[in-house]
């Protein structure tokens, strides 16, 4: 039995997950079906969004924030972070610019802040 707090909405339901039979996972304590989906995903194949920042050249700002376009498998987070350390952006950078396509399993790394070019 595992205890989880659902992160899909502000309610933060405290759920109990019985995954002793992986073919029939039982979830209690959820208020909505999103909680069940979250709990099953969390015990079978947990994923997380990865956020960080990368250096940018040619701008008055030294770094831009970045994130993955979708969650990546939890066991691959440190591999993704190692790849992010190799990324350097060149101004101008617009929000949503893909800075590293397919950083992990078809998931891209995109800028979440912008940087204008120095004149």
Image (spheres, grey):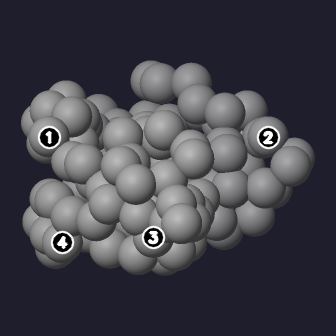
Q: CA distance from mark 2 to mark 4?
A: 33 Å
The residue identified by callout 1 is 86
Mark 4, secondary structure of its residue:
strand
Q: Which of the marked residues, 1 or 4, is nearer the chain's N terminus?
A: 1
Q: Is any atom of residue 93 visible in this view? A: no
Q: CA distance from mark 2 to mark 3?
A: 39 Å
The residue identified by callout 4 is 101
Residue 96, image x and y in percent? 49, 75
Q: CA distance from mark 4 to mark 3?
A: 18 Å
Q: Which of the marked residues, 2 or 4, is nearer the chain's N terminus?
A: 2
Q: CA distance from mark 1 to mark 3?
A: 19 Å
Q: Is any atom of residue 116 visible in this view? A: yes
Mark 3, other Cα within 10 Å: few <14 / some 14–19 / many ≥20: some
Q: CA distance from mark 2 to mark 1?
A: 36 Å
Mark 3, secondary structure of its residue:
loop
Q: CA distance from mark 1 to mark 4?
A: 13 Å
Label 3 near label 2: C-beta < 8 Å? no
Q: Residue at x 32, y 60 (%)?
A: 90
Residue 50, image x and y in percent? 39, 45
Determine whether 19 is above or below 70 in the image: above
Which marked residue is nearer to the observer: mark 2 or mark 3? Answer: 3
Q: Nearer the viewer, residue 19 or 75?
A: 75
């Amino acid at each position: 039995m595992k205890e989880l707090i659902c992160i899909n909405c502000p309610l933060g339901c405290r759920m109990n997950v019985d995954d002793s039979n992986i073919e029939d996972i039982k979830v209690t304590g959820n208020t909505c079906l999103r909680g069940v989906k979250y709990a099953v995903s969390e015990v079978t194949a947990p994923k997380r969004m990865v956020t960080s920042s990368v250096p940018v050249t040619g701008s008055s700002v030294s770094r831009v924030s970045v994130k993955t376009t979708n969650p990546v498998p939890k066991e691959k987070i440190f591999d993704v972070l190692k790849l992010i350390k190799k990324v350097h952006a060149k101004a101008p950078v617009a929000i949503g610019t893909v800075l590293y396509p397919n950083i992990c399993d078809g998931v891209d790394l995109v800028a979440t802040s912008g940087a204008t070019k120095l004149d």
